Structure formats: C-alpha cells, structure tokens
Amino acid sequence: MMKEYSIGQMSRRTGVKVTTIRYYESRGLIPSPARTTGGQRRYDEAALERLAFLRHARELGFGLDDIADLMALAEAPSEDCAPAHEIARKQLAAVDRRMTILAQLREELVRMADADDPGHAGKCRVIEVLGDHRLCIGAHDQPDASVDLSNS
C-alpha cells in the first residue's frame, strides 16, 4: 500500500506552510492530490519529494518559473542538463548582484553608525543621511523590484 500524507503532514515534514502548499498546488508546481470522501487532500510520496525539491530550490533563491523548469527537467531524465546549469548560472548572477548591493548598503550603514555626532538629533549623521540621499557615498538603490533585501 502506498503511503499518503495529509496537507498538515506535508507541511510538518517539509517545513512549508499549508497556505504555501495550496498556492504551489494552484500554480501547478505540485499536483492536485486525490481527496478522501470527506474532502481532505491526500498526497503521495512523489508529491512529498516534489515539495521538498521546491522548498530547497526556494531556499537557494530560485523563482517559481525557474523551479517549474527545473522540475520539468527532473521528470525527464534523458533530457540535456544544460538548461539546468543555465538556470543555476542565472541565479548565481542574481545572488552576486544582491551581494554587491548589500556590501554597498553595509558600507553606508557603517559610515552612518560610526559618525561622531554631538548627541543631538538635529546634528545626527544617521538622520541627515536618511533625509538627503545625496549625502550617501555610493549608489545603493535597489536596481529593480525583483531584488529583495528584506529578511522576510
């Protein structure tokens, strides 16, 4: 008999939130599972493995479209591997861009934090720099909305 998992079990085993699993299902990244007579989702081992693959790829920063392409390659073992390497190289370049931006942000924050201020907010370097971008030493604007530097 084949092992089946509820959506809660899938969540616990992979660390992916239930709402995210439903979203991935709606995007076609994991197959819509069979349902019990009571309407509960029942996922198989292949869906669990696919979700673990997806989670790991997301941890490495891959976007959902790239993950879908990688999953398609994983399901076609006789296909050429070159597209997977190209996707990985593209992701590496994106990480390198973010690291450059983060290094610039760090440099500016160190400069702001280490400023020798007289102790009054009216002459506070942190407040001045945040109020006037021209006082910054480098360009650290996010180049586009796809570069997320938050901790979320």
Image (cartoon, grey):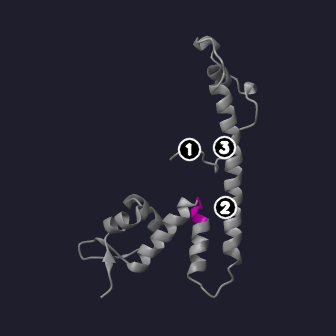
Mark nearer the viewer, 3 or 1:
3
Separation of residues labelled 2 and 3 (CA atoms): 16 Å
From the viewer's perspective, is 142 left or right of 33? Answer: right
Which residue is outermost to the left?
Answer: 38
- Where does the image place residue 152, in percent across and percent down from the top left? 50, 47
Mark nearer the viewer, 2 or 3:
3
First in sequence: mark 2 or mark 3? 2
Separation of residues labelled 2 and 1 (CA atoms): 18 Å
What residue do we see at 60% from left, 73% from top? 70
Residue 93 visible in image: yes
* Magenta region, residue range: 61-65
Residue bearing mark 1:
150
What residue do we see at 60% from left, 65% from top? 65
Mark 2, secondary structure of its residue: helix
Residue bearing mark 2:
91
What residue do we see at 39% from left, 79% from top? 45
First in sequence: mark 2 or mark 1? 2
Separation of residues labelled 3 and 1 (CA atoms): 11 Å
Residue bearing mark 3:
102
Q: Amino acid at mark 2?
A: Gln
Q: Amino acid at mark 1?
A: Ser
Mark 1, secondary structure of its residue: loop
